[in-house]
Amino acid sequence: MNDIAVVKEAFLKATDGLEERLCAMSDGFYCNPETGFNEVKTSQAMREFLKSAGFSIEAGIAGLSTA
């Protein structure tokens, strides 16, 4: 197996089961639009998702509470 196939297999294994959750988040963003620099619910949902995936999140960058 070549390097690309190994990476692809690892990616597919790591992302298995995320489709439903990501589609639900996307649908929620679409159905509840928030305008520029006021994406409070969207920002919160993304932070929670990324934290649950093990990312360390820093909010409030550059004076923007949603960044």
Image (cartoon, helix red, strand yellow):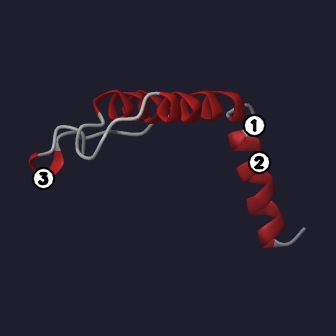
Locate residue 36, reporting x and y percent. Answer: 27, 47
Rendered-image quadrant of the N terminus: bottom right
Mark 1 — residue?
16
- Tag 2's secondary structure? helix
Locate residue 53, reporting x and y percent. Answer: 51, 34
Q: Is residue 62 left or right of residue 13?
A: left
Q: CA distance from mark 3 to mark 2?
A: 35 Å
Location of residue 15 by image quarter: top right
Position of residue 20 relative to residue 59, above or below, is above
Q: Is residue 50 left or right of residue 60?
A: right
Q: Nearer the viewer, mark 1 or mark 3?
A: 3
Rendered-image quadrant of the C terminus: top left
- Tag 3's secondary structure? helix
Q: Is residue 54 left or right of residue 5?
A: left
Residue type at mark 1? Asp
- Tag 1's secondary structure? loop
Position of residue 6 relative to residue 41, above or below, is below
So how many labels did they put on this image?
A: 3
> What residue is drawn where x is 64% and y is 34%?
23
Mark 3 — residue?
62
Locate residue 56, reporting x and y percent. Answer: 34, 39
The answer to whether the residues at label 1 and label 2 have Cβ atoms under 8 Å apart is yes
Q: Nearer the viewer, mark 3 or mark 2?
A: 3
The answer to whether the residues at label 3 and label 2 have Cβ atoms under 8 Å apart is no
Other residues around mark 1 within 10 Å, as few (<14) / some (14–19) / many (≥20): few
Q: Is residue 41 left or right of residue 9?
A: left
Other residues around mark 3 within 10 Å, as few (<14) / some (14–19) / many (≥20): few
Residue type at mark 2? Leu
Q: CA distance from mark 1 to mark 3?
A: 34 Å
Mark 2 — residue?
12
